[in-house]
Amino acid sequence: MAKRNTPTTTKRKEPASATWAAKHTTLIAASGWMVAVFLGLLELPAKVNSFFHEAPTAYKNVTDLVLLDQQYSGVWTSDLEGWIDATVDERAASTVDGSPVVLRLRVYHGEVEGELYSGGLEKNYVYTRLMVEGRKRWGGTIDAIVYDYIDGKKTALAQFELSLDESARLPLRLKAVHQGLRVLPETIGLYRNDDAFPDDLGGINVEFYKKVLKRFNPDALPTDRADQKQS
């Protein structure tokens, strides 16, 4: 039986330079990965601290977004100045006794707080801008009061209701439920206007103070000597 000759295979020898490059490329890649991990570990405490610092703010922002009532919260006014297309009925309804009304509301998780300015306060009270608090019912209506501190006690000057009718041009309806002094209109519509409640709106009602002082003590008000009649 003839012996079968098997061809011999000669292994190709890699150049020394290629072998060196491959080894060092692997080493460099491994070193780069290790450096990246090391740098990441160095940055970890700062990232952890940043997370714990920013997490409460992020949580509060999300909570506010969920619990803040966007329908009611904001600035509302009954003043139709600038409404060139306001109807006769709308203008008449916005100028009733006790108007205008400007209301800033924050309704959070059903709790209501804010401020109110009104023509009724300007006419009948020592402050033209007072605080508001109340609560939103399950049905959507808000029960609220306008209050001041008298002799150190929180005292409601008026109780009122707020309800929304999104189809109306003045969607927020304010209805007075009870008031000793006439500080609010019996009923009035309001619409959103973020610029309607500047920081300097209302405050101490100087004219009312003058009327009260003049009524009970005419001599208490200072007078200009030039206006006094010569005897």
Image (tube, grey):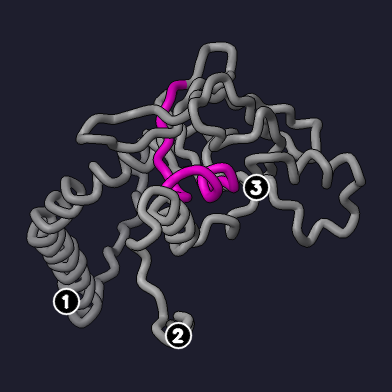
The residue identified by callout 1 is 20
Comparing 92 with 81, the one in front is: 92
Q: Marks 1 and 2: CB-CB under 8 Å?
A: no
Sequence-earlier tag: 1 or 3 = 1
User: x, y percentage for residue 52?
Assistant: 16, 46
Question: Are there few (<14), some (14-19), or many (20+) residues within 10 Å of tag 3?
Answer: many
The amino acid sitting under disc 1 is: Trp
Q: Quadrant of the C terminus?
A: bottom left
Comparing 137 with 216, the one in front is: 216
Question: Are there few (<14), some (14-19), or many (20+) residues within 10 Å of tag 1?
Answer: few
The residue identified by callout 3 is 100
Residue drawn 58% across the image and 55% down it: 194
The amino acid sitting under disc 2 is: Gln
Which region shows up in magenta? 117-135
The residue identified by callout 2 is 230
What is the distance, in whole Å, between disc 1 and disc 2 at their CAs?
117 Å
Indicate the secondary structure of the residue bearing disc 3.
Answer: loop
